[in-house]
Image (cartoon, grey):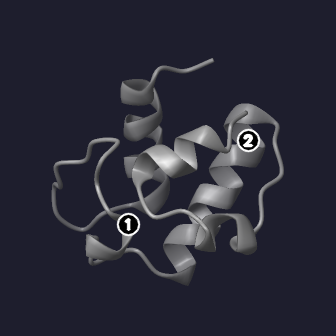
Amino acid sequence: MDTLEQFVEKFKNAVDFQDDVELTGDTNLKALPEWDSLAALGVIIMFDMEYNKAITGKDLVQCQLVSDVYKLIG
């Protein structure tokens, strides 16, 4: 399983931020300007490709922090 730091890098790539952002596990998703339905779709695809795990938009809605998304890996 990836460390949180490795996950954060994959998360950055999946969301495809326009500007360089400083992300940690404690970063609030709602504070990210690019966090929208398209970004969520990128994260859903990342989970499928990188972790062979299916998550839904409902799973992501329940997440507040980047670390909450990381915990979805299981």
Residue 49's mark?
2
Tag 2: residue type? Met
Q: Is residue 42 left or right of residue 13?
A: right
Residue 70's mark?
none
Q: In the picture shown, does residue 63 fall above or below 12?
A: below
Comparing 52 with 26, the one in front is 26
Picture quarter with the C terminus: top right
Comparing 35 with 28, the one in front is 28
Report x, y in % for residue 20.
Answer: 16, 55
Residue at the spot of label 1: 29
Alpha carbon distance from label 2 to label 1: 21 Å
Comparing 31 with 51, the one in front is 31
Name the residue: 83% across, 51% down: 54
Name the residue: 27% across, 78% down: 33
Report x, y in % for residue 68.
Answer: 52, 50
Task: Kindly indicate the quadrant of the structure image that contains residue 70.
Answer: top right
Q: In the picture shown, does residue 48 fall above or below 19?
A: above
Of all residues, the one furthest to the bottom in this rendering is 37
Q: Nearer the viewer, mark 2 or mark 1?
A: 1
For the residue labelled by badge 2, is the local secondary structure a helix, a strand or a loop?
A: helix
